[in-house]
Image (cartoon, grey):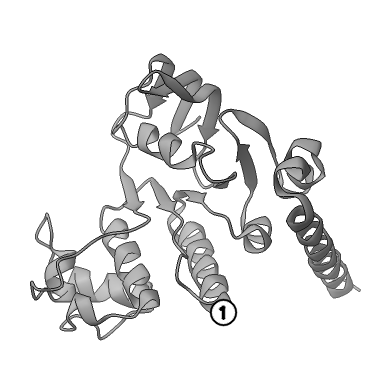
Amino acid sequence: MSLISTKDMTLRYSGQPVLEHVDFTIKPGEIVTLVGPNGSGKSTLVRALLGVLKPQAGSISREPGLQIGYVPQRLALDGMMPLTVARFLSLPKRRSSTAITDVLTRVGAMGLETKDVAQLSGGQFQRILLARALLMEPHILILDEPTQGLDPPGISEFYRLINEIRDETGCAVLLVSHDLHVVMRASDRVVCLNGHVCCEGTPHVVQAAPEYRALFGDEAEATLALYTHAHDHSHDHQHGEGH
């Protein structure tokens, strides 16, 4: 069963194909990451999955009643307009203070209810956007470059939080990311885009794919070395436990 899938989907902007013949699917509970160079169509695919863009060819199907929680890449808020975190989380739908407190605690942003959104740090704001998406009680969370502007510890922490939320709620997660190192540790499946699906599979399979290496070059090599080391290490650790 898939929550969202596309079949042979093609999308054009002013006559130019941005994505061609894309077959994509995401199942409940999966963490899937989209990687690809700038201009490869990652955000276009997300907008199509959200229903913002209509494909010129092929099809998109969604599970009936599918709830999507979306964390955008950037959200421009008018700094002139005072807006507390609690008020922001009650847009566009009123939320009880209990629901707001609960979700802020869940994302590690407790006590921020009365803070002005404009005064939050980058990391705090990402957590607030995530909290807002979680209030949708989503079957799938879609996060477009959610760690932009965060430092490396902040990035690792954010992915760990996403993993916990997936484990607790069973929701699927679709990440658009260029944090190759972290992605490879945090994903069940990686889809590499460059106007079409170049390769997809488990992180290990994708990293060995020539198409992936051609796109990411040295960075791919470095990531593979890191991933293999971390993977072997955790594997040894797991097996060591049993004896």
The residue depicted at 30 percent of the width and 42 percent of the height is 67
The residue depicted at 79 percent of the width and 68 percent of the height is 230
Q: Residues within 10 Å of mark 1 (few under 14, many from 20)?
A: few
In the picture, measured across the screen, residue 123 lies left or right of residue 152, that is: left
In the picture, measured across the screen, residue 117 lies left or right of residue 24, that is: left
The residue depicted at 77 percent of the width and 47 percent of the height is 207
Q: Position of residue 239 (x, y in %)?
A: 87, 67
In the picture, measured across the screen, residue 2 lies left or right of residue 121, that is: right
**Based on the displayed image, in which of its 4 quarters is residue 121 positioned?**
bottom left
**Based on the displayed image, in which of its 4 quarters is residue 11 positioned?**
top left
Please tell me whether residue 66 is drawn above or below residue 143 in the rendered image: above
- Which quadrant: the C terminus? bottom right
State the SS at label 1: helix
Please tell me whether residue 111 is drawn above or below residue 29 in the rendered image: below
Farthest residue in the top direction? Answer: 57
The residue depicted at 88 percent of the width and 73 percent of the height is 240
Q: Which residue is mark 1?
A: 153
Q: Position of residue 194 (x, y in %)?
A: 60, 35
**Closer to us: 190 or 3:** 190
**Closer to us: 28 or 147:** 147
How many numbered marks does the figure carry? Answer: 1
Q: Amino acid at mark 1?
A: Pro
**Closer to us: 54 or 16:** 16
Farthest residue in the right direction? Answer: 243
In the picture, measured across the screen, residue 52 lies left or right of residue 63, that is: left
Q: Position of residue 48 (x, y in %)?
A: 37, 31
